[in-house]
Image (cartoon, rainbow, N blue to C red):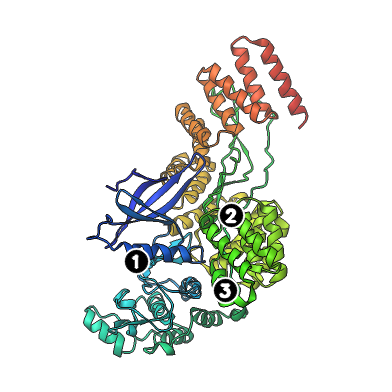
């Protein structure tokens, strides 16, 4: 029986999030000591001959594996059996479905621009799907999922391979979104089938109404077959009305021939200067920005009751990795009789281990190259192409060593193999070998200087190497190639933030939000930039907006709580920080900030509890041990306090305050020699500052 808390292989079931004729979908977590990753597990009903056709499930798995890794497609991770269930593990779409998104917004997009952006993302995924050789056949809002603000295709249970005017014996799809040919006795399917469904969604986004809206199925079918679609109001631009009308032509030959053709028409409407026919595959690489080492401001000991207190903000990147951002410390006078020791502010916890799921770390290991391979087989020698395909297969299975070996063999046989360099760079990036990633991206750029994805990938690798100026140059080139891609502009904003050029980062976040008004991460990180400038109210407003867009945005709650704490509004701060932990109980910085707040409120027990949890998640953070040692000293647990100070100076031999605080403990227990030695060590370190 499936239930909350049940463990399926390495996944723990958290909450049932979907139900259908096939079975149930559960949100599940893969938990390690360093991270918690979320996935969707789709369970098919118990695999008996009477209840399920195993072949149908196997087909869905096979199709999904072939198209995993495509941009704007929810990727499958693996499939297996458990307790008579067949289950598929896929990426978790944290933003829900387009159906839910529409329901929350009155059934339509808020602006024309927003509608166009959403449709372009859907078409982007559809274009790659078609070029890889498949037709979806069930495009509808419920099958468009939102992954970190990006609209992606999902649910490939009725997908079939493209053949010339393919014939199917079963009608598939949802009636409102089905084209006329779907109601034939022997329905013919083609890419135009999906184009029709996208046009229905587009009219729905633009007007809040379906082009064919009859309630009864017979009359709906008749209308789709014989009637013209409902007229759209004049406030919808004429160009867009024409695009929708073309995509809803009764004869599929009269519709857009490909998803790319419809993309081109929309790009022309946007006024883009990009020649769409030359657009290359743009990999959406989740920019994992390495934080620069922030200078820690140490204070001289002016009195026994001075606390150097600060709170850390977190920056959300595309794989939801927790990144503390550098925050300048400020002194807070402690209440009288607070402590005979000094408690230090939160440090930047060490970077949590990167999620090794390729599709999460880099949203775009583009299996489109496989389609390019099929379409252009004459470009490659047979052996090189085979090695490249083997590399793709290994990458999808997360066997990165195997992928690197096979891509390398492909390159050896064909030194100008652009796709092989680019895909190997992705693997190196995901594995944390940024220098090799940079080298391969350089080769890819030399072979194709107009490929935005290669510039974007190299920029992310440069950022992780701390080369922010070079990263910004590459991000700028990427933006020149794709000026309407909000994620590119947003990523450059992160690089500016890491350079502490906050005005420039805000400018980029502003542009990203103009393009995508629902870009929660951009609001969150713009809030961080405002906070760095001391604009606390604007920061809180941005965190609040991010939360309105994504009610499960744990880092936005954390950051808003942090800002509330800096205002001294501890009650609201605690409320937000606890909400962040409800969403993600492994956000370590939240525990540290809660501990600081409880310390200031004289609630040493709760402070101690939160430092304990932080240390469980960050066992090598010296400040955590030092601060916990202070609390243990306050409580008279001298032996445990000394152990924590010992661990703090072991991790950071330059931690002067830990020597000072340990000397106070030694004085209390009468060990004058050790107290004097620690005091001398403290004096030596402070004189060097």
Q: Circle 2 sits on which residue?
A: 402
Dot placed on the residue nearer the N-terminal end, 1 or 3: 1
Dot placed on the residue nearer the N-terminal end, 2 or 3: 3
Q: Circle 1 sits on which residue?
A: 103
The quarter of the image holding the C terminus is top right
Q: Is residue 477 left or right of residue 527?
A: right
**Residue 254 sits in which quadrant?**
bottom left
* Residue furthest top in the image: 670
**Residue 41 sits in which quadrant?**
bottom left
SS type, badge 2? helix
Q: Circle 3 sits on which residue?
A: 372
Q: Which residue appears at 54% of the width and 65% of the height?
A: 513
SS type, badge 3? helix
Please identify, in this view, whether the residue under mark 2 or under mark 3 is nearer the observer.
2
Q: Is residue 251 left or right of residue 20?
A: right
Q: Position of residue 569 (x, y in %)?
A: 48, 41
Q: Residues within 10 Å of mark 2 (few under 14, many from 20)?
A: some
């Amino acid at each position: 029986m499936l239930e909350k808390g049940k463990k399926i292989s390495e996944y723990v079931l958290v909450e049932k999030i979907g139900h259908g004729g096939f079975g149930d979908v559960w949100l599940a977590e893969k938990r390690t000591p360093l991270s918690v990753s979320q996935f969707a597990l789709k369970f098919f009903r118990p695999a008996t001959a009477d209840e399920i056709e195993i072949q149908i499930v196997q087909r869905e798995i096979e199709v999904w594996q072939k198209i995993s890794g495509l941009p704007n497609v929810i990727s499958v991770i693996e499939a297996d059996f458990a307790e008579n269930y067949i289950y598929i593990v896929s990426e978790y779409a944290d933003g829900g479905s387009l159906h839910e998104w529409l329901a929350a917004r009155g059934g339509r997009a808020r602006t024309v621009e927003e509608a166009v952006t959403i449709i372009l993302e859907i078409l982007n995924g559809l274009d790659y799907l078609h070029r890889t050789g498949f037709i979806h056949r069930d495009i509808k809002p419920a099958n468009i999922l939102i992954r970190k603000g990006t609209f992606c295709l999902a649910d490939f249970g009725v997908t079939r391979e493209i053949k010339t005017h393919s014939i199917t014996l079963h009608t598939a799809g949802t009636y409102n979104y089905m084209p006329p040919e779907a109601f034939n006795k022997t329905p013919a399917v083609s890419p135009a089938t999906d184009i029709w469904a996208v046009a229905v969604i587009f009219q729905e986004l633009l007007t809040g109404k379906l082009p064919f809206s009859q309630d009864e199925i017979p009359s709906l079918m008749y209308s789709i077959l014989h009637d013209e679609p409902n007229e759209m109001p004049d406030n919808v631009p004429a160009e867009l009305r024409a695009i929708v009308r073309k995509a809803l032509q009764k004869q599929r030959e009269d519709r857009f021939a490909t998803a790319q053709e419809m993309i081109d028409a929309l790009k022309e409407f946007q006024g883009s200067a990009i020649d769409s026919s030359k657009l290359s595959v743009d990999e959406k690489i989740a920019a994992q920005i390495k934080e620069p080492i922030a200078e820690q401001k140490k204070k001289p000991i002016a009195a026994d009751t001075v606390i150097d207190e600060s709170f850390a903000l977190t920056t959300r990147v595309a794989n939801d990795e927790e990144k503390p951002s550098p925050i300048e410390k400020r002194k807070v006078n402690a209440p009288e009789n607070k402590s005979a020791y000094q408690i230090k502010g939160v440090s930047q916890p060490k970077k949590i281990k990167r999620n090794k799921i390729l599709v999460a770390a880099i949203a775009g290991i583009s299996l489109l190259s496989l389609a390019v391979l099929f379409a252009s087989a004459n470009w490659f020698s047979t052996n090189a192409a085979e090695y490249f395909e083997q590399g793709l297969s290994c990458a999808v299975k997360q066997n990165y060593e195997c992928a690197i070996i096979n891509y390398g063999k492909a390159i050896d046989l064909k030194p100008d193999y652009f796709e092989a360099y680019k895909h190997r760079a992705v693997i190196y990036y995901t594995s944390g070998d940024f220098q090799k990633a940079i080298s391969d991206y350089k080769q890819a750029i030399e072979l194709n200087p107009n490929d935005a994805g290669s510039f974007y990938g190299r920029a992310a690798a440069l950022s992780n190497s701390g080369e922010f100026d070079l990263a910004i140059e590459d991000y700028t080139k990427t933006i020149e190639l794709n000026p309407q891609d909000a994620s590119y502009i947003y990523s450059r904003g992160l690089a500016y933030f890491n350079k502490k050029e906050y005005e420039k980062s805000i400018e980029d976040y502003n542009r990203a939000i103009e393009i995508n008004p629902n870009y929660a991460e951009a609001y969150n990180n713009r809030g961080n930039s405002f906070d760095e400038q001391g604009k606390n109210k604007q920061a809180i407003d941005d965190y609040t907006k991010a939360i309105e867009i994504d009610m499960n945005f744990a880092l936005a709650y954390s950051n808003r709580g942090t800002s509330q704490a800096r205002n001294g509004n501890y009650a609201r701060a605690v409320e937000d920080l606890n909400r962040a932990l409800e969403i993600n109980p492994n956000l370590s910085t939240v525990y540290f900030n809660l501990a600081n707040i409880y310390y200031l409120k004289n609630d040493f027990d709760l402070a101690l509890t939160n430092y304990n949890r932080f240390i469980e998640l960050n066992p090598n953070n010296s400040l955590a041990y030092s601060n916990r040692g202070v609390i243990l000293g306050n409580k008279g647990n001298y032996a445990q306090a000394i152990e924590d100070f010992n661990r703090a100076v072991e991790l950071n031999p330059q931690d002067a305050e830990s020597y000072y605080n340990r000397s106070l403990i030694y004085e209390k227990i009468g060990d004058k020699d050790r107290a004097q030695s620690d005091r001398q060590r403290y004096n030596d370190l402070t004189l060097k500052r």
